Image (spheres, coloured by chain):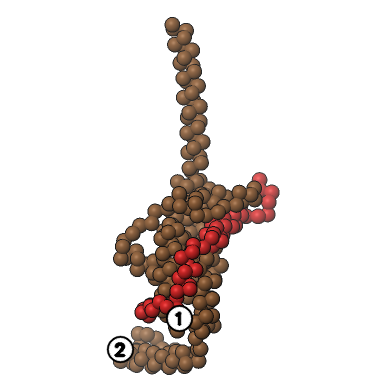
Amino acid sequence: MRTSCFDPMLMRQARIGRSLREVYDGVADSPMPDQFDALLSELDKIAVPERR
Amino acid sequence: MLLWGQLKRGEFMTIIQDQSTETNTANERDEEAVVPLDDATFKQRLAATIPHLRAFAYSLCGKMDVADDLVQDTMLKAWGARARFRPDTSMRAWTFVILRNCYISQMRRNKFTAPYDEGVAERTLTANSDQQAPLHLEDVRMALMQLGADQREAIILVGAGGFSYEEAAEICDCAVGTMKSRVSRARAALVAMLDGDSPIGTRRQRNSADEAMSDILGTLDKLSEGVTALAA
């Protein structure tokens, strides 16, 4: 017999959603390689043909 | 109200052309009104999106080194097209579209497959080991990489990236209903995988079964040793 008012499926989805955010944040919060700092400082000098 | 069936082909084309002309004029007016960001501000806002770009790229390709290359390409393309960025829109959404296009182009050009690399993920990602962690992140990552590409990007954008269905649909160039359906199917697939109805989830069960089988065989060995000893 269910004694909780929470839908088990919704609870599972909420847990998965939280874990997904942790996976995403795990990458987003990881140290950024130096290559990006170098690229940002070089952008002014890089001529890129506009194509999108 | 006009029914499409009542229109002759010529009338239909005229309506389309009129609408097209009106839309073009409106777009031209909009473009005139937009003042592009100066380079320094653009660069600052671009830099702020890098962590998100890396997370999205990783979720697409599953390899951190490939993801970083994708982000670099994206930054170069975004820089090249900076005059077309509208300051009143989301830089993150705009760069996500570019990154996604870069990824699709690479897929088509190289036909590379991006298998999930557990080793790279282990070295690159940091997972909290607190007791409150709801699921094993390793399992979630593996389950995520087993989803189809469409569903994976949908659930990452909406479920982790914080985009609305509308924004995610725009990034993925699909209808909002399609996006909702992809997210829903991805959620269901993840629940199934992580609850044990599919390979990821059954991994632990399989390990338990293997252990149980080892116990049984171990017990049989001991019994057979006893029998052998008695026979001797």
| Residue kind at label 2, given as amino acid type | Arg
Q: Is residue B225 visible?
A: yes
Q: Tally the numbered discs.
A: 2
- Of residues B171 and B44, the one nearer the viewer is B44
B133 left or right, relative to B208 = right
Q: Mark 1 or mark 2, which is nearer the start of the sequence?
A: 2
| Residue kind at label 1, given as amino acid type | Arg
Chain ID, brown in image: B
Q: Chain A shown in which color?
A: red
Residue A38 is labelled as none
Q: Secondary structure at mark 2?
A: helix
Q: Could you tell me which residue is drawn at 46 percent across and 9 percent down?
A: B229
- Residue A26 image position (x, y, % from top left): 55, 58
- Neighbourhood count class around disc 1 (C-alpha, 10 Å): few under 14, some 14–19, many 20 upward: some
Residue, disc 1: B82
Q: Which numbered mark, 2 or 1, is in the foreground of this view? A: 1
> Could you tell me which quadrant the C terminus of chain B lies in?
top left
- Residue B11 image position (x, y, % from top left): 33, 92
- Residue B30 image position (x, y, % from top left): 48, 90
Residue, disc 2: B9
Numbered disc 2: what chain? Answer: B
Q: Secondary structure at mark 1?
A: helix
Residue B26's place in the image compared with B194, above or below, is below
Q: Could you tell me which residue is drawn at 45 percent across and 78 percent down?
A: A44
Q: Could you tell me which residue is drawn at 50 percent across and 40 percent down?
A: B205
- Of residues B129 and B17, the one nearer the viewer is B129
- Of residues A39 and B158, the one nearer the viewer is A39
- Of residues B210 and B136, the one nearer the viewer is B136
Numbered disc 1: what chain? Answer: B
- Residue A52 image position (x, y, % from top left): 38, 77
